Amino acid sequence: MPTETPRLLIINGPNLNLLGTREPGIYGASTLADVEQLCRESASALGFEAELLQSNHEGVIIDAIQAARNNAVGIVINPAAYTHTSVAIADALRAVELPVVEVHLSNVHSREEFRRHSYVSPAAVAVIAGAGINGYRYAVDHLASLLRED
Ligand code: DHK
């Protein structure tokens, strides 16, 4: 029997469905479809399958994180504005005990003060900010190296 390809769950939070048209000077010209294609290709090149989720709803994101416990080996998450507000997403990420990489398209540290605090970062093995959509590629690459070490 062929063994299943290990899966990475890649989550994009609120308003990231608007990528490409939303404040392009900050978030870039690439669309969510471009991000998802990049994630699929990066994962596949390293022997993983990417499961993609974008949601504007905190509970949907939490349900997907909980489900990842049984169907994924790692998580890449851009929690978008929930980064700065959601104890519940941070708790879910801790609960599933999978390696998590937090990604931000923009350099959140060079923006408004409230974007400098992340509830998610303490639950992540790495945080990538300011690299645009390449940040997702770096996140997948980092998870793949970590998981290969196991
Ligand atoms: C995306 C958002 O929607 C913001 O709320 C965050 C993040 C930053 C990003 O840079 O990808 O503050």
Image (tube, grey):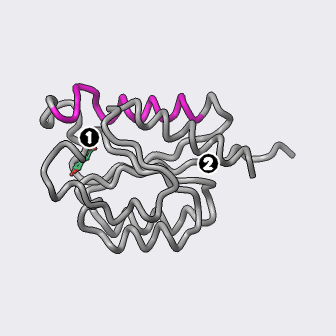
Going by the numbered disc 1, the residue's amino acid type is: Asn
User: Residue 18 falls in which quadrant of the image?
Assistant: top left
Instruction: Kindly tell me whether mark 1's CB lies below 8 Å from ligand 1.
Output: yes
Q: Which residue is mark 2?
A: 7
Image point (19%, 42%), residue name? 110
Residue 125 pos. (x, y %): 52, 55
Residue 15 pos. (x, y %): 21, 48
Going by the numbered disc 2, the residue's amino acid type is: Arg
Residue 30 pos. (x, y %): 28, 27
Q: Please check the rendered image and state whether residue 34 is part of the magenta-colored stretch, yes or no.
A: yes
* Up-down relation of residue 26 to residue 104 (above or below): above
Is there any visible trace of residue 118 in the rendered image? Answer: yes
Image-based side of 41 in relation to 25, left or right: right
Q: Earlier in the sequence, mark 1 or mark 2?
A: 2
Residue 92 pos. (x, y %): 45, 71
Q: Which residue is mark 1?
A: 107
Image-based side of 81 in relation to 75, left or right: left
User: Residue 120 falls in which quadrant of the image?
Assistant: bottom left
Image point (26%, 60%), residue name? 117
Question: Which residue is more in the foreground, 136 or 35?
Answer: 136
Q: Which residues are magenta?
A: 26-43
Q: Please check the rendered image and state whether residue 102 is part of the magenta-colored stretch, yes or no.
A: no
Is there any visible trace of residue 54 in the rendered image? Answer: no
Disc 1 to disc 2, C-alpha distance: 28 Å
